[in-house]
Amino acid sequence: MAGFYIYARYRVQRAIHQLPTKLGADIQQNTEGFTYSQAAGGHTIFSISAANAIRYKQGGKAELHRVKIVSYGRQSDRMDEISGDDFEYDAQSGDITAKGKVAIVLQAVQPTTAAPDSNPKKVGSPLHLETSGLRFNKNTGIANTVEKITFALPQGTGAAIGATYDSKKNIFQLHSDIQLLTNGPKPTNLQAGSALFEQESQQLTLTDLRAESGMRRLQAQRVVLHLRDDNTVERAEASDGVNALLQGVKRAQLHAAEASFTFGPQNQATSGRLGGGVTWETSGSTASRGSAARIILGFGADNQIKSAQLRENVTLLQLPAIQNGKQS
């Protein structure tokens, strides 16, 4: 009996002695609330806040919970936000790495109004994104991920692989495999190799663009979209080769070195210009082949072409009509 008592007491005392290690003896500091900000030119560039921070003795790392990173832009015209539940902070590298899902909101505000604890007037619609594995460096102000990222904007929803966000230069980039399906009665499926959004100029550059809507197909090596404050497209410029295809009974295909289009506030095409040498061929009852140095287009309802002006070095050849696979 005495031996059992002594053994039991030894086990209890040993367990009590080991409790600090099991409960986190390597914890140096546990604080409620964590904030960090970086300023330049007299205003805050970005701020980092966490509801809770647990700092460890080994390695200078810490756990951050309920984290929010806000970028205010060089002109104090942004309220871009990165948020997530759990992050790890490495004091040596300055990296703040997400352990799970991260929400990203890109939002423009009126210039010179964005600052910590401010409530600036928002401009246009926000862009919502979600990803994981995101790493933000507090020294450079750059966030990046190699994981899948999904996004939603007024025109539709999509996804991509990998992204980089530079809070100091106000640049957001999608790395590869971009997919976007637009809203509306005639949705368009867009694919691109990469995308670069320059927030200050409201300019979106796409590479290797492919678009498909019903029987229409479009390919362009490089497309620059000039956006309004509400993120609708005001003007589109395509270069380095543009190919268009209309399938169906009246099949048509066109090639131009470059193209530009203007759009109304409801994404309605209002005018177009094809240049750098344009060639085309159509089939059906009015089959033709031709070329021109440039073409000026006018649009009607549902983005249908209602007029086309052929300019400079125009050639036009009427071809035999093909019906049921036979020339007439």
Image (tube, rainbow, N blue to C red):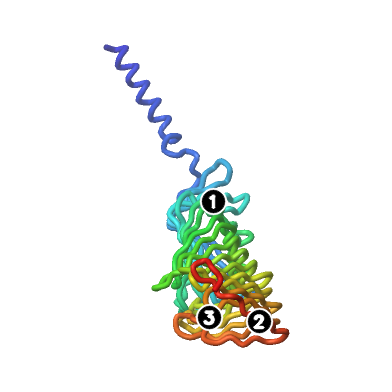
Along the horizontal axis of the image, is 138 left or right of 214? right
Label 3 or label 1, whichever lies nearer to me, is 3
Quadrant of the rendered image containing residue 225: bottom right
Of pointers 3 and 1, the one earlier in the residue sequence = 1
Going from N to C along the chain, the mark reached first, 3 or 2, is 3
Q: Which of these two is toward me, 284 or 89?
A: 284
Name which of mark 2 and mark 1 comes first in the sequence: 1
Say left or right for 277 vs 67.
Answer: right
- Residue 147's x, y, as percent? 53, 52
Name the mark on residue 89.
1
**Which residue, given by chain and number where applicable, does mark 3 sit on?**
228
> Pointers 3 and 2 in contact (CB under 8 A)?
no
**Helix, strand or loop status at disc 3:** loop
- Residue furthest toward the front? 328
Amino acid of disc 2: Leu
The residue nearer to you, when weighing 25 against 151, is 151
Amino acid type at image mark 3: Arg
Q: Height in image: 54 above or below 258?
A: above
Residue 178 on image: x %, y %? 54, 60
